[in-house]
Amino acid sequence: MPRLRATSLVTAALLITIVAGVGVLPALAQLGTVRLGLLTSMTGPAAATGEDQRRAATLAVDEINATGGVMVREANARLKLELVIGDDQTSREGAVSAVTRLLVADKVALVFGGLGSAFGMAALPQIREHGVPYIPTPSTPLFTRNQDMGPDPTKSMVFHYQATGLMYGAGIVDFLVREIKPLMSADRPLRVAWLYQDSPFGAEYVRGYNDRVKEVGAGIETVALERFKVGETDYRTQLTKIKALTPHVLVPMGFRGETVAAIQQAVLDVGIDPKKTHIGPTCACADDPLYYKDLGRIGQYTTILSLYSTHAIPKGATFAKWASYRKSYQEKFGQLPGLLGVSAYDAVHVAAKAIERAGSVDKRKVIEALGKLEMDQMVLPVHGGKIRFDPKYREVPFVLFVQEMFWDEKVKELRPVIVWPGDLAEAKYKQP
């Protein structure tokens, strides 16, 4: 009898161990897959760009699964990745609903992606409540630079994979001072007007710009900071005010469709002369195949600040993967990728590497692995060639560059030429 009792105790202990071990792994991992949740816009004004993210993420998942998936030590197996889409409907309310479904119903191991900063920020309370690792790809630095999300090791489940608005805003100033000012206002301050989206996305671009203006001194005079609401389509009232101020530069800052409409209305409806007012640099989020097509000939000589180009490839080993990525994407989907799609593609590979390093899909272990991650850059260019999230704000230092647009009569679309910085430039900026 004592021996049977001992055997029963051992059996019970083993059962407890097994159950505890199962509790570490989400139920889906037991079935042989790891679910990754892509939070993006599949409907609403940003749906076309959301589709780019879905395609690019699908490409990354397929690539990883073709090699057998991700080795997870705790499962003692290679597990395939499964992509689950959460449609934020290009709205804050949609983002809350979508991320809740991803976390509660779909039980994803990690959330990534996103287009609008405001939508990604709306998802943060749910991310925080569930303690799930999150790799957002919109630009606002408030994903990690806020009181609720850090810098605090107990709150650092968010790892920002996009150049921030602060980085972009500073880059805009550097380009304007070094390339535009000598041509348009060499002996006086450069007069700059902004038309920007009234959201965390637009506000942080302006903050980065203002911070850098203070650093460079008296070279720039900001004459207008006009705002518009997300999804607004008529900007002629704001543009008329801007025209009356005779700026040297107009910076239109919005999503792709908003940027196209703003530039077209500025030139065609309000009469802002691109020969007298430089238009740009526009947002990197506009660097999408449809931008080159939809903006049309009116976009000649405008500029865009980006970290990926739909058509151009900067020189150097930093950009060596661009051609093969484009080829794979185009062969699979029949069209070229845009910037935000590339962000989602990279984020899948970052997530897979972190899970592999953690040897687990346990949320806390994956978060810890992301914090210690060091891996070769994927497609987006990173200073030093290694993806690392800095320990304070969990951001990555990306390489930025400016392209100038020119009309290509053969393809009947705009095509870019890299004009800044000098070590990446194909040509000098051309003043119309």
Image (tube, rainbow, N blue to C red):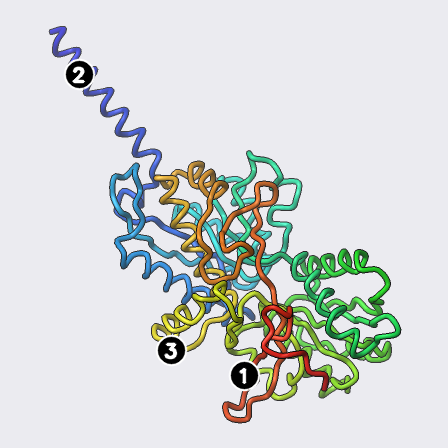
- Would you say 237 lies left or right of 233 here? right
Q: Which residue is mark 2?
A: 8
Q: Please say if the residues under marks 1 and 3 sit with CB atoms less than 8 Å apart.
A: no
Residue, x 31% and y 42% (percent of image)?
72
**Badge 3 element:** loop
Q: Is 29 on the left-hand or right-hand side of 156?
A: left
Q: Which residue shows up at 84% across the image and 76% down it?
A: 185
Whether 247 is drawn above or below 9: the answer is below
Category of crowding for the residue at label 1, using alpha-carbon neighbours closer than 10 angstroms: few (below 14), some (14–19), many (at least 20): some
The residue lying toward the viewer, choosing from 172 and 38, is: 172
Image depth: mark 2 or mark 3 in front: 3
> Residue at image x 53%, y 54%?
384
For the residue carrying disc 3, how many other residues have a C-alpha within 10 Å: few (<14), some (14-19), or many (20+)?
few
Q: Position of residue 124 (x, y in %)?
A: 56, 47
Say which label, 2 or 3, has the lower sequence index.
Answer: 2
Whole-angstrom CA distance, mark 1 to mark 3, is: 16 Å
Q: CA distance from mark 2 to mark 1?
A: 72 Å
Q: Count residues near mark 2 (Cα–Cα under 10 Å), then give few for <14, some for 14-19, many for 20+.
A: few
Residue 76 image offset from top left, x and y in percent: 25, 39
Mark 3 lies on residue: 334
Q: Secondary structure at mark 1?
A: helix
The residue where tag 1 is placed is: 293
